[in-house]
Amino acid sequence: MAENSDIARRVEELRAEVARHERLYRVENRPEITDTRFDALLRELRKLEDAHPDLAPPDSPTRTVGDDRLEAFETVRHLRPMASLDNTYSRDELFAFDQRLLRVLAEERADPGDPLPYIVEPKIDGLAISLVYENGKLTRAVTRGNGEEGDNVTANVRTIPTLPDTLAGGGHPGLIEIRGEIYMTLAEFRRVNGEREAEDQPKFMNPRNLAAGTIKQLDPRVVARRRLEIVLYSVGALEGGRFDEQHEIHECFRAWGLPVVEKYWQAQGIEKAWAAVEELDRLRSTFAYPTDGAVIKLDNTNWQQIAGSTSKAPRWAISYKFAAEQAETVLRKVSIQVGRTGALTPVAELDPVVVAGSTVSRATLHNEDEIARKDIREGDTVIVEKAGEIIPAVVRVVTEKRPPDAEPFDFAARLRDLGHNAERVPGQAAWHLKGRNNPELTRRRIEHFAGRTAMDIDGLGTEIVRQLIGADLVRDLPDLYRLKAEDLLPLEKFARKSADNLVAAIDASRANDLWRLIHGLGIPHVGAQSAKDLARHFGSLDALMAADTEILAEVDGIGPVMAESITAFFADPDNEARVRALVDEANVNTRALESRDETPQNLSGLTFVITGTLPSLSRDEAKALIEKAGGKCTGSVSKKTDYLLAGESAGSKLDKADTLGIHVIDEPKLRALLEG
Ligand code: IVH
C-alpha cells in the first residue's frame, strides 16, 4: 500500500516535471534540459504508467504530442492530424521495432521472411510545420499545435526565401498537406545571438528555439529579418494523387521546387538501415540543418497503412536519436552572473574540456533548485553535456570522486558573501537583486542607459559609472542629469576637459530620439529594434505608457511576452518614479523625431543583386524600392549577397548564386519582403 502511494506520487511528480519542460520547450522556447534528459523523464513515466495503467489518464504527456499554440494566433484544424514519432537511443530497440513490423505484416507479404524495405532520413531539429498547397499555390501554413489544431502562421512562413509560393512543374494535386521542418542555420543563429549579446538581451539556447520563437512573432517583418529555412519530407491530406513509396515523396517535392533533405537512404532490412544510420551520423555535420537523429520509416505506404498508428505516433516509423556528447571534468567554482535586470544566475566554472567539438569551460546551472536537486558542490567531478549548439549543462555529479571536504552549495550564503542584496522571487526558483539603491543593479542600469544602442553617452563607461556610484554622486538614472563638472573634478581620472566633455555628452543626450530613451530604460525583452517599433508606433512616451497589454501586442514587432513585460515595467512604482524624474526634472525628449509614415526599413542590412527582366518593375525601380527600405544593391553576386532578385532570362548570376547557396527571389517575393 505504502509502495503504491509512493509510485502514485512519483508519477504525479514526473508528469508535472514533463509538463513543465514541454512548456519550456514548445511554448517558451527556452528549454532547461537537453532532449536526452527529457526523453529519460518521459521514459520513466511511461514505464510506471505501463505497470500501473490506473495511473495513466488519457491526456498524460506519454499519450499526447504536447501543444505549441499561443493565444495571439488563429487556431486552425489540420486536415490530417500531425503525429509525433516514437524515439529511441538504443540499437536493440531499433531491431525490436523491425521484429514488430515483420510480425504485423507477416500475413500481407508473400515471403514474410524477406527483409522489410526501409527509408532512412535525417531527423531535422527544427519545428514541425504543415503547409497546404491548393492547385500548386501555397494557401496556408500551420504549426503542429496539439497535433489536431495548430497556429496559423502563414504570413510568417511566406517570408522564408527558399519556399516557393507556387509549385514548379505541372500536374499538382488539387490539395496537398506538405509537412516538414522550419529551421535556422548555425551561421544565422550565431549572427542573431551576436546582435542580442551586443544589446544585452538574453541569448537563445540553440537554433531550434530561435527558429520556433521567430515563427511565433506577430510581425512578419521581424521574421523576415531573421533568415529562416525550411525542409519538407512528408504528406498529410492528399486529394488527387497518391504516393506508393516514401522516397517518391522526396523526388516529387524536389521536382516541385521545394527544399528537401540533402540525402536519404533506401535500405533492405534493418541491418542495412542501421548502417545508414551510422553513415548519417558521420555526415550530418555537413548538412545545412541541425540534425539530432535519424528517422527510419517503412518505405511502402500500403504497409504503413496496415501497421497503423497509436494515438501519438505511427507504428511504421521510429526515430533513432544521437545522444548528446558528454565529458567528465572538475567544477572549480560556482560564480554568479548578474543580468541587466538584476537576475542572478549560477554558472559552473569548469576545468576546460572538449565536448562535441568545442572547448567548454563554463556551463549553466540554471538556478538554486537545480543545484540542490543535483547536489552540485564546488570541487565535484561532474559530467557535462552539450548537444549541437545547446549551451553546455552539468548533467550530474560523479559522487565517487567527491572530495571529502566538499560542502553542499548554499546559494543564499554565497549571495551574501558576494555582497548581493537579493531575494528569491516568490513562486519561482530565480533570485533577483533587490532594492532601488542596489549599487550593482544601478551600475548595470546606467551602463545600459548610456550604451551605444541606447542614449549613446560618450565617456560613460563601466569604470566611470563605478566611480560615480562609489562617490555617491549617482544613485539612479535621473542623477546623471544633475551632475556638474565641479562634482567630477575630485574623482580619479577626471581633468577639467574630460569633466566638461562628460557633462556635455550627458546634456546632449536629452535631445535623443524617443527610441533611444525607450531602449535605455532597460525594459526586459525590449531590444533596440523593438524600441524603434514602439517609438514609431506611439510617437511619444506618454502614449506608450498609456497603452495596455492588448494594444501593445497589436503593434507590429511586439509579441505577447514583450507586451506583458512593458506594462509590468511601467506599473512598477520605482520604474514610474524614475521615468517621471527623467521627463519632468531632467527634461529628456519624449517624442519620436522620425516622421511616422516613413517607409519601414524592412531590408535594412540586406544586400541585393538584381538580374534578368522583372515582370512589372524596371531594374532601377526595383533598386530604388530596395534602397528606400534600407537595403543595398550591388552589381555582382558574392558571399556577401543576401538575395539575388531574378527575373526572366537571368543568366550567369543565377548560376553563381546557386553555387554559393545565395537565396534567389522573384518580384512577388521582393514585394512580400518590402511589405513584411
Ligand atoms: S516523419 C507521422 N521525418 O520530428 C510521421 N519527422 O520527434 C511523423 N521530424 O513530429 C513525421 N525530421 O516534426 C519525420 N525526416 C523526418 C523528420 C521528422 C524531423 C520531426 C517531426 C516529428 C518529430 C518527432
Image (cartoon, rainbow, N blue to C red):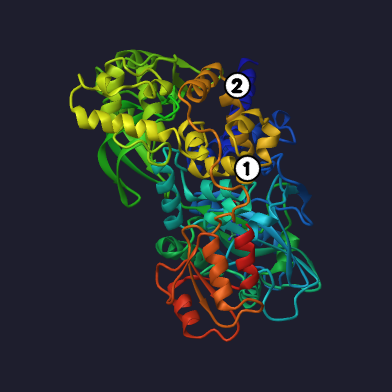
Tell me if residue 331 can be seen.
no
Tell me if residue 444 can be seen.
yes
**Residue underneath mark 1:** 537
Q: Nearer the viewer, mark 1 or mark 2?
A: 1
Task: Give the position of the N terminus as an image quadrant.
Answer: top right
- Residue in the picture at 55% in, 75% down: 620
Residue 382: % across, % down: 32, 33
The tag earlier along the polypeptide, 1 or 2, is 1
Q: Count neighbours of disc 2 (C-alpha within 10 A) and say few if under 14, some if 14 to 19, many if 20 or more.
A: few
Residue 47: % across, % down: 60, 36
Asked whether, in this view, residue 71 is left or right of residue 381, the answer is right
Residue 347 or 399: which is nearer the viewer? 347
Q: Secondary structure at mark 1?
A: helix
Residue 312 or 132: which is nearer the viewer? 132
Quarter of image, ligand 1: bottom right
- Measured in 3D between alpha carbons, the distance from the residue under mark 1 to the one under mark 2, in whole angstroms, is 20 Å
- Image vertical order of residue 489 relative to residue 62, above or below: above
Amino acid type of disc 2? Ala
Amino acid type of disc 1? His
Asked if the residues shown at circle 1 and circle 2 are in contact, with their CB atoms under 8 angstroms apart, the answer is no
Residue 447: % across, % down: 36, 31
Task: Give the position of the C terminus as an image quadrant.
Answer: bottom right
Residue 359: % across, % down: 28, 46
- Residue in the picture at 64% in, 58% down: 157
Q: Which mark is residue 571?
A: 2
